[in-house]
Image (tube, rainbow, N blue to C red):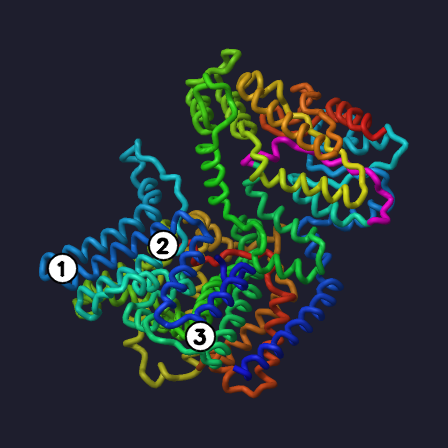
Amino acid sequence: MKKLFYKLCAALVIGAISIYISNIIYTKYFYKNDLELFDAKMLLKLDSLQFNSDVLYFAESSNGTTAYSDTCLLSISQMMDTLSPLKINAIEHGAIHAKTYLNLIKHINSNALVKTLVVTLNARSFGSPWINSKLETNLSQANIIYESMPPIFKRIKLSFNAFDNKSVQMRDYINEQNWSKNKINVPEEFPYKTVRQWDNAMANGTYLLPNGDWDIPKISLACSYIKTYAFSIDTLNNPRIKDFDEIVNVAKQKNLKLIFHLLAENVQYADSLVGKELHHIMYENKQLLIDRYTRKGAIVVNSFELVNGKDFIDQNWTTEHYNQNGRWILAKNVLKQIK
Amino acid sequence: MLFNSLHFLVFFPIVTLLYYLLKHKYRWILLFIASTYFYSAFFLPYILILYFIIIIDYICGILIENTKNKAKLFWLLFSIISNIGLLVYFKYYNFFVDVLVNYLPNIKHLDIILPIGLSFHTFQSLSYTIEVYKGNQKAEKHIGYFANYVLFFPQMVAGPIERYDSLGKELRSKHVFKFKNISKGLRLILYGLFVKMCIADNLAPLVNEFYSNPTQYYSSSAWLALVAFSIQIYADFYGYSTIAVGAARLLGINLMDNFKQPYFATSFYQFWQRWHISLTTWFRNYVFFPIGGSYVNAFRWITNVLLVFSLSGFWHGANYTFIIWGFLHGLFYLIEKGFSNLIPVTLAKNKIFLTFGAIATFILVTFIWVFFRAENLVKAILVLKQCFTYTFDAKKELIFNYQTIAMLVVLILLEISIYKSRFDKFLQNQNITIRWSVYILLAFCLLLFSGIQSYQFIYFQF
């Protein structure tokens, strides 16, 4: 037993020294490559931007544009920067969500120039399809890179699967379970109590579109709206709630002014394609988010119904991508609160 | 739970500590709870499938022992049908739907997830009832020990497929704490992690990249990708098996070796004596021998060999590609057998001839792996075609970085060193300087050069 104890001690000491040396080597020679590998360069960007920006705008792809018809290619944050005397920069990356924002915000130094954070509050990101998206594995890996710890520990966590590493089949399965089992918040007389029932009815044509049209692309889009937006936010278990709550706390600790930008959703299309029940569910979720985060002391800029259906770039899918009209409207709306 | 996860690195020391603190008569309870927890970490509801297998085969074992003739056969068949039925339902149902969809248009796919390691559990459990039926094994009366035989967490998801007479006995034996077991177990775990994380996980992105679009690559890259997959699949499965043997050893339990440097094999016959040994043994004992084995006429023998190899391919996955993979192995095995009678004994023992045999076997095995890796037959043919498509058009090259090459060099040197031994035994015979140099080398490799995008063990899907 004594022999084992000594050997264990020796192993622990050698292990600790190995980790220390490895951290030096890794940070110097390999860390930047891994940042690139996981598309996690935002960390480097944040390191410089926090010292030369008054406002940092944290966003997913909603900030920019992919519209060929746009003559103005400025992102929402750039539009805000143009309209404001303050220096406004963006930390952005497609498909990221509250967890990434949180990890990045934790990196902001107490002596940084930035004093105001605008964080996009994307209602769709609270739904099961986004939480269990197949992109989540990569995002979880990138989130480890964004954590505040010595780089070698991040590498160990990545190598040893300390992230959400579910298979695509498992994620699909969880989504299906959520759609089949979770009750949705609809009036009593509504015949469909779960997303699965509603989606099936829509897909099979038993639930007609409000305007009487019935064609495959519209049905497909309507189904997508149901699966994406027909959920009721569970404030106890939803991981986004946990992360946004934590963002509020971190911002308070760092004495930063926090603005949540509740992004515009294509409510018009949801209404016309699916009907007033979906509109009702979306409205309830919106209201919950506004109430919750206003109560917690953050400023919530409500852009939820501000953009017209035609000003969404993706006309056949559910996204928060806006053309230049939409982006100008949103930029001006957020700017009102910054002033 | 994955072996290469922080979850396991916390879970396993706790289990080991509790195991040695507990009295022997309570250890089966700990192992049962630990194994249940280990499996539930993948997907909780599927533990019920394992419990179902345990209950069915436990009862069948007792009934087979206590009955005679037709009743005995009935309970054996009941066990076989229950186990194979589960396998067919979860693993092969959708494949058969694809085959039959033209004849039965109303038949639909099942929207289910394949339970991890189902083929391993069912085969291991079946071997028990078959052995009880043959009278070689007494039925286990203690359901706890039998449950641990099916569930034993170090080997439950990807083998080695153990027989009850070895693992059952090991589980029942009283294991006292021995430093030797701890050091041997830890060595094996360290080496297994190195092989999986530094070799397999570094090669995986290269192989995946190539197989996602093989026609974009030069033929030289296609060859490289084929070799890379040969090494990846070996490192992946060998790494898992080594960790499994090491983890069991820490608990004082000996598991069989599933690999013996298969790529040093000088023939297909030798390859199958060195690759996935427990599965080869299972098919030999429970399929090949019962259908006549080698003691039949030449035509029947050829049919038997091809059938068993094709079945072993089908065991891996519900796809034509796996059947072809198995069939080709059988075919080359037969061709080799045919030629071996023509080769003089002196030549067969010649070192140059044996080296040539090893190279030829490796090349052929590498080509056949294409059917194992490709998602479908079209992709497999495309990959093989790409190996022989020479063009002046601009194409992509598969690039191995220096780290990966360095890791491969370390692996090859270590594999040559342990050629006639096993990693733990090899180190046992070295002096302290060499031993600790190897530990530190492997620890640095794991810390700095392990694949940062971790991949699940390939054999978990079977």
Residue where numbered disc 1 is placed: B72
Would you call the spot at circle 2 few (<14 residues within 10 Å), some (14-19), or many (20 or more)?
many
Residue type for callout 1: Lys
Question: Does residue B434 appear left or right of residue B358 in this picture?
Answer: right
- Residue furthest left as drawn: B69
Task: Give A329 or B302, whichever is nearer the viewer.
Answer: A329
The reply to the same-chain question for discs 3 and 1 is yes
What whole-number distance in Å separates the C-alpha atoms at marks 3 and 1?
Answer: 44 Å
Indicate the amino acid at tag 2. Answer: Leu
Residue at mark 2 to residue at mark 1: CA–CA distance: 26 Å
The amino acid beneath tag 3 is Phe
Q: Sequence order check: which comes first, mark 2 or mark 3?
A: 2
Instruction: Specify the segment rendered in magenta.
Output: A110-129
User: Which residue is labeled 3 in the image?
Assistant: B264
Residue A126 in the magenta stretch? The answer is yes
Q: From the top left corner, tell me how far across and down residue B167 is, in percent.
A: 33, 70
User: x and y percent of residue B77 in the render?
Assistant: 18, 55
Query: Would you place residue B102 above or below residue B299 in this image?
Result: above
Q: Chain of mark 2?
A: B
Sequence-wise first label, 3 or 1: 1
Q: CA distance from mark 2 to mark 3?
A: 30 Å
Residues B438 and A104: in front is: A104
